[in-house]
Amino acid sequence: MTTSLLRVPPPQGLLRPLAVPERLLLGPGPSNVPPRILAAGGRQLLGHMHPEVLQVMDEIKVGIQYAFQTQNQLTLAISGTGHCAMEAALLNLLEHGDTVLVAVNGIWGQRAVDIARRLGADVHELLKPPGEYFAPWDIEEGLARHKPSVLFITHGESSTGVLQPLEGLGELCHRHGCLLLVDAVASLGGAPIFMDQQEIDVLYSGSQKVLNAPPGSAPISFSERAREKMLRRKTKPPSFYLDMGWLANYWGCDGEPRRYHHTAPINSFFSLREGLAVLSELGLESSWERHRANCTLLCQGLRDLGLELFVKEEKVRLPTITTVRVPEGYNWKEITAFLMDNHAIEIAGGLGPSAGKVLRIGLMGCNSTSGNVERVLRALRDALSHLRRSRL
Amino acid sequence: MTTSLLRVPPPQGLLRPLAVPERLLLGPGPSNVPPRILAAGGRQLLGHMHPEVLQVMDEIKVGIQYAFQTQNQLTLAISGTGHCAMEAALLNLLEHGDTVLVAVNGIWGQRAVDIARRLGADVHELLKPPGEYFAPWDIEEGLARHKPSVLFITHGESSTGVLQPLEGLGELCHRHGCLLLVDAVASLGGAPIFMDQQEIDVLYSGSQKVLNAPPGSAPISFSERAREKMLRRKTKPPSFYLDMGWLANYWGCDGEPRRYHHTAPINSFFSLREGLAVLSELGLESSWERHRANCTLLCQGLRDLGLELFVKEEKVRLPTITTVRVPEGYNWKEITAFLMDNHAIEIAGGLGPSAGKVLRIGLMGCNSTSGNVERVLRALRDALSHLRRSRL
């Protein structure tokens, strides 16, 4: 090599080792990943069309069918994070001019509105203040008034800590000729959901919460009704990467020979497969019960500390993420910083409509243990006493 | 728990251990991942907004600036595979009705046409048979005739093994008021590219080829000209996940405080950071030279076996992926299957317009070694003698 043509030198920062401290992640996700699942993600690569990878994809598919309690053929994982699955759901279901009704009581409804507007849909919002949920009559009124072809609703509102009851909503939607699209990113595996029995048409989640895998892949499933709507599309979806026709083939859901579509995030699939295996071994009902029990323990402990839970009714509290009002006289940022600096524990402040109002504590997957409940309560007590003292 | 409400039982397949055999991946990617980079991807999670993760993102940014040879502020990694970066480039640059010219001489041009049409662009194709490349006058004629606002061209055509010369194309495009968009998924780090000096406006790549990381994140960068076109958009891009305005903020490219956008694939970023670190330590020029030298060695060996290289001119042969005609009387599938079954080596058949015509052998990143050249040549010789024998 004679004179170098390079104008940009090798960056110094990259010549230092990667630093990843150990932390207990009790925020709204990602959650900590157990060694078995990390190890799966650290396995050597295979080609994206090798039979072993296709088998892993098949196993993911049945794992999602189990976690979602569905027999839908069109069940697969998106090659992106939970947010990407939200886009995949909306952009495959909606066409320019379609009417969609979005139930907004936190950030995820707001996001769905943003995405649906980008897609040229006629978007109507059904609003509730953060911390509240939708009753069947709220939904029914919205369906009757706006006559949407799709209703979007969030099962686990991670920004507010609300668990939306889904009973009867599928039937209600279908009576009004509407499809039911449910976001279960924060709730899947932590609270009961029955895709088929509850007549949910599109359901998606993420890998990095109860499923205990790193972010990077996202389960999704479509009912026969949803599939028919997609087959009737007049225009192609505005994405090739997320086009459900192609993905259905790539995931072996259409009975045709599988064709190359994109290079999938193979290691993310290895991790997701293990996350679903752990859930299958534990059993869904045990997982729901574990999350419920540890959430109850946490809520009691928070009340014992004199804190006020943000979601009043116990039955609509999300078992995976608990929201508590920022105590009077405290700055939420000082509390979260204290826990991080002194206890290596992450908890989070609010997000979107709950910003500044709440603290969010997540107990998800392997992190949902009574030991972690005690750890975070001890750390919070420590924070409240020290931070208060420093103000006197 | 009394009577179970579950209708779908835990899948048996998931109760068996994950099986991942060791293979030498000498196809068009993914390539094998060195232990250091696998280990980075197997590290415990951190939150997506923790300072250590933001620092990793900053390091990725400067690493990409180095690999691309650019000083563009708007440089980051997409939370998806290389294909997702192609979509991000097109959907941020193009609006409904924009005119785009796509140079098509293999599958990637075809894909860009598909995506641009989905976005409602007025798409014109500049066609060359697979195995050929575009001369400046081909491009100039297309620019003059169609007056596009964007030209798409593939630097490393992994389906045909062509390395497209880029010299002068940026200047040519700019003289015609057009932006130059280049796909370097298969070539980055394996062949010289100088984003700033060559006046490339949008450049993207993938993580799973020369960068030696698993698929799941994808480098991308935008010039000031490209940024201005995006700022002049009349409509929002049809994706929130890939909206460059939001991603620019999330990656600290706009000088504003960073806001939560989506939960990034954190471990994929750890791996990508290490892949860029390995490239920085080795040095771009050494990496280019290594890929060139091993490709030359491979080409000579293939000719010694009596095989015919698909790309005639040496100067436009992609150093990372070599294409060779399927020898007369052989079935390509039998050859690739023989190498897999008897040598645990992956090589690939053609893709899209090269399907059935060629075999593709990749030597990328840590897999670009003289030892691997010998291994694959030995395996090929074995295949040709055995398969021929079985036919006599």
Image: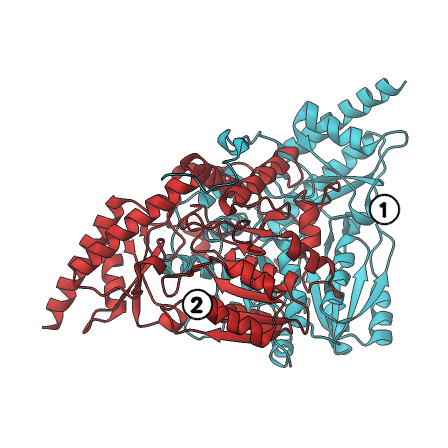
Chain colours: A red, B cyan
The chain holding disc 1 is B
Q: Quadrant of residue B259?
A: bottom left
- Does B54 sit left or right of B162 as displayed? left
Residue at horizontal 84%, vertical 43%? B310
**For mark 1, what is the residue?**
B312
- The local crowd at label 1, few if under 14, some if 14 to 19, many if 20 or more residues have their Cα within 10 Å, is few
- The local crowd at label 2, few if under 14, some if 14 to 19, many if 20 or more residues have their Cα within 10 Å, is some
Pick the residue in front: B329 or B135: B329
Q: Secondary structure at mark 2?
A: loop
Q: Mark 1 is on which residue type? A: Lys
Residue A291 image point, x, y percent: 34, 48
- Does A294 sit left or right of A111 as displayed? left
Q: Quadrant of residue A59?
A: top right
Establish if A309 lies above or below A297. below
Quadrant for the N terminus of chain B, please: top left
Pick the residue in front: B154 or B296: B154
Q: Is residue A87 visible?
A: no
Residue B209 image point, x, y percent: 62, 47
The chain holding disc 2 is A
Q: Which mark is residue A134?
A: 2
Pick the residue in front: A273 or B186: A273
Which numbered disc, 2 or 1, marks the residue closer to the eye?
A: 2
Residue B343 image point, x, y percent: 67, 25
Q: Which mark is residue B194?
A: none
Q: Is residue B373 visible?
A: yes
Disc 2/disc 1 C-alpha distance (Å): 66 Å
Residue at horizontal 75%, vertical 76%? B97
Establish if A368 lies above or below A382. above
Quadrant for the C terminus of chain B, please: top right
Q: Mark 2 is on which residue type? A: Phe
